[in-house]
Image (tube, grey):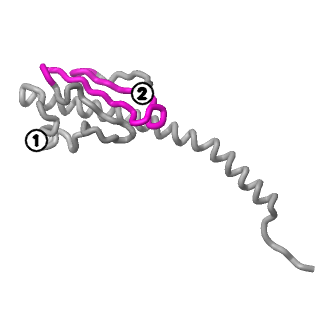
Amino acid sequence: MKNNTGFTLVEIMICVAIIGILAAIFVPNIQRAKMTANEAAAQKNLKTFGLALEQYSMINYDYPNDLNLLVTASPPYLSENIFDGNPREGYIYSIAGGAPSGGTYFLTASPASCGASGRKVYYMNTGAQPSEADCS
């Protein structure tokens, strides 16, 4: 009598079905957690950039007309300029008019892909806390 070892087709199909069910449960949860992390990072980045603008304004009595001054100043107010159009942590950052003007600024953080990298658009006026709106 021959002693065969290995898995039958039914056993392999059951394993594949279990893996598929687990993937269907966990993948959406992982994506949701990543979106939540992206949204928290967007709020933090807006606060950090707003704080850098306020610190620059306190020392120089005006906001910078070039955002790169916040990075190139000695000592620098920021480690990098996030307003270059490149997505960071799922969000694209912009400033109205390209730089503060008339003693005010308006910062925006929009998801690179609404619903995939974030569900909210964050914005911040001069000296305020970030506010949010649903992206559409």
Which residue is painted at 33% across and 35% down in the image?
92
Residue position marked by numbered label 1 in the rendering: 73
Q: Residue 9 magenta-drawn?
A: no
Q: Amino acid at mark 1?
A: Ala
Q: Residue 104 magenta-drawn?
A: yes
Dot 1: within a 10 Å radius of its alpha carbon, few (fewer than 14), some, or many (20 or more) residues?
A: few
Which quadrant of the structure image shows residue 81? top left
- Give the magenta range: 101-128
Quarter placement of the C terminus:
top left
Q: Where does the image place residue 132, in percent across and percent down from the top left? A: 38, 23
Q: Which is more toward the observer, 9 or 59?
A: 9
Residue 120: mark: 2
Element carrying mark 1:
loop
Which quadrant of the structure image shows residue 1? bottom right
Which residue is painted at 64% across and 43% down in the image?
24
Q: Where does the image place residue 2, in percent across and percent down from the top left? A: 89, 79
Q: Is residue 16 above or below residue 86?
A: below
Q: Amino acid at mark 2?
A: Lys
Q: Where does the image place residue 80, in percent across and percent down from the top left? A: 22, 43
Q: Which is more toward the observer, 74 or 120?
A: 120
Which residue is painted at 44% across and 37% down in the image?
117
| Number of numbered discs visible in the structure rendering | 2
- The extreme right residue here reads 1
Camera-near label (1 vs 2) is: 2
- Relative placement, left or right, of 73 versus 33 is left
Element carrying mark 2:
strand
